[in-house]
Amino acid sequence: MAKIWDENMHTLVRIDPQAFVGLVLPGAQYVKHRSEKLRNWQLEVDALLDAVICGEEILIHIPFEGWSD
């Protein structure tokens, strides 16, 4: 079940990333979606989005939880 939840959340972010950026940081504007696999680190992220707020470029990381722990 956790895998399905995770896949569904990835799909939702890909469909409307601005909705998630606005939810996490109202007023921020979505710029682009980065790869889930980071080249320089041995990590995978759920959602890594470039955004702009007040003229400043920011990076928003949204982790998805598959379990209620």
Image (cartoon, rainbow, N blue to C red):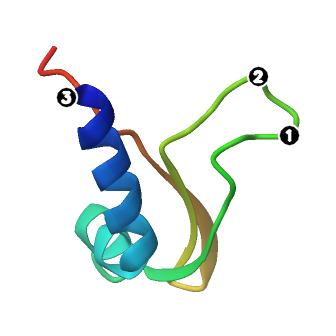
In the rendered structure, the answer to whether residue 52 lies left or right of residue 14 reads right
Between marks 2 and 3, how big is the CA–CA gap? 25 Å
Q: Nearer the viewer, mark 2 or mark 3?
A: 3
Q: What element carries label 1?
A: loop
Q: Mark 2 sits on what residue?
A: 42
Q: Which of marks 3 and 1 is nearer the N terminus?
A: 3
Judged from this view, the residue extending furthest toward the left is 68
Q: Which of marks 3 and 1 is in front?
A: 3
Between marks 2 and 1, how big is the CA–CA gap? 8 Å
Between marks 3 and 1, how big is the CA–CA gap? 29 Å
Looking at the figure, which quarter contains the N terminus?
top left
Q: Which amino acid type corresponds to the residue marked 3 in the rendered image?
A: Met
Q: Are marks 2 and 3 in contact (CB under 8 Å)?
A: no
Percent of width and height locating residue 58: 59, 64
Q: Is mark 2 on a helix, strand or loop?
A: loop
Q: Mark 1 sits on what residue?
A: 39
Which labelled disc corresponds to residue 1?
Answer: 3
